[in-house]
Image (cartoon, helix red, strand yellow):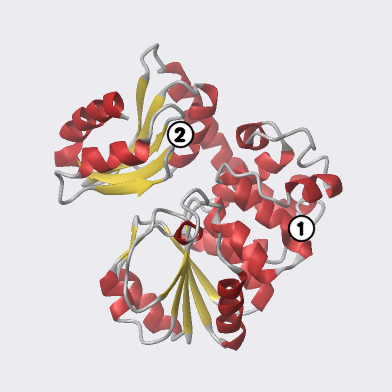
Amino acid sequence: MIPESELKEIRTYLEKSENPLFFFDDDPDGLCSFLLLRKYLNKGKGIPVKSGFLDEKFLRKVEEYSPDLVIILDKPLVKQEFIDKINVPVLWIDHHPLTELKGLHYYNPLKNDKEDNSPVAYWCYKIAKRKEDMWIAAVGSISDWHIPSFAKQFSEKNPDLLPKNIKDPAKAIFETQLGELTKIFSFILKGKTSDVRTAIGILLKIDNPYEILNQTTSKGKFLYKRIKKIKGMYDELLKKAMSEVTKDDFFVFYIPLRKIAMARDLATEIHYKYPDKAIIIAREKEDTISISVRSAKHNVQKIMEYALREFEKSYGGGHIHACGGNIAKEDWNKFIEKFKEGLKKW
């Protein structure tokens, strides 16, 4: 858990800030975390971070916006060199495996309870304390395969979004309207940077989930129209991936070059449909291969550590049953070989 004293400390920093700058992971948990704090403060800029590392190349954004506070949300990999060159307070709220960096304020539930990796959106909801935004916190939490402590209260108010009998995060994602929202939030983050920025700006003005699901307002209609094309591309890729699944316990699917980044979404859904398989969804880039890894039976966090330890240009990490990474093309075949070895160990 993150103790109330630390949540209070975060609130104090946020409320004193006149021009906060948020860097957040480009997944629904990261997006929801930003939305919750941005709605709470009604000020600040947000930058979704698509790359694995938050590093020196993002310093230009710090220079551009001249913030008096930098907040990092749900990013597992942050470079010390990035922190060293920022001359304002930095808050890092995360729930991935613990790391040690200097010159910032680090908040992570794993510091106090090694079993508690509750999503960052859950903690941002506890920071903001805005009941009207519970649905956003629910989207972020469920998207990270976590049933939050407020789920019962949410279900009582919104049984059509999350029925009371749903206790399994996987079923919440793939069998409920709340799960549909997690997909919508994920698709909102895909595509051109300018389109993503516009969509997030509109999302900040959405007051309730039905504006999107039922398209009851012009804002909701705009967002639904935007993700419709992306959803079509996703469905096409999912169909292709499903057609290539074999009886093997280990499945690798390659997304063609220049396709929109959908590895994370595909890995999650194929993992749901084939829970006994270890899955890697790989998306080719120019010099690297971006991967999303899932397995219910194996500790892919340890397997990734094992498979990557020989490589200098490749990196990755995440949670026990879900990881991501970027593998240099020159390392790919050896990485797969090491990953298979790891499957036998963990």
Where is residue 139? Give x, y as percent. Answer: 65, 50
On residue 218, which mark appears? 1
| SS at mark 1 in the image | helix
Q: Quadrant of residue 308?
A: top left
What residue is at 17 percent from the left and 51 percent from the top? 313
Count residues near mark 1 (Cα–Cα under 10 Å), then give few for <14, some for 14-19, many for 20+. few
Where is residue 129? Give x, y as percent. Answer: 72, 68
Residue with the most extreme right position? 157
Count residues near mark 2 (Cα–Cα under 10 Å), then give few for <14, some for 14-19, many for 20+. many
Q: Is 167 placed left or right of 9 in the picture?
A: right
On residue 125, which mark appears? none
What residue is at 75 percent from the left and 45 percent from the top? 213
> Of 331 and 153, which appears nearest the observer?
153
Where is residue 267? Give x, y as percent. Answer: 45, 34
What residue is at 50 percent from the left and 48 percent from the top? 115
Q: Is residue 83 above or below residue 221?
A: below
Confirm whether residue 31 shows in the render.
Answer: yes
Where is residue 15? Give x, y as percent. Answer: 62, 84
Question: Gap in Å between the C-alphas at discs 2 and 1?
Answer: 32 Å
Residue with the most extreme top position? 247
The quadrant in which the C terminus is found is top left
Q: Is 293 placed left or right of 55 in the picture?
A: right
Looking at the rendered structure, the kind of residue marked 1 is Ser
Q: Quadrant of residue 293?
A: top left
Confirm whether residue 32 shows in the render.
Answer: no
Q: How many marks?
A: 2
Q: Are marks 2 and 1 in contact (CB under 8 Å)?
A: no
| SS at mark 2 in the image | helix
- Quick one: label 2 or label 1, which is nearer the N terminus? 1
| Residue marked by disc 2 | 267
Looking at the rendered structure, the kind of residue marked 2 is Ala
Mark 2 vs mark 1: give the one in front. 2
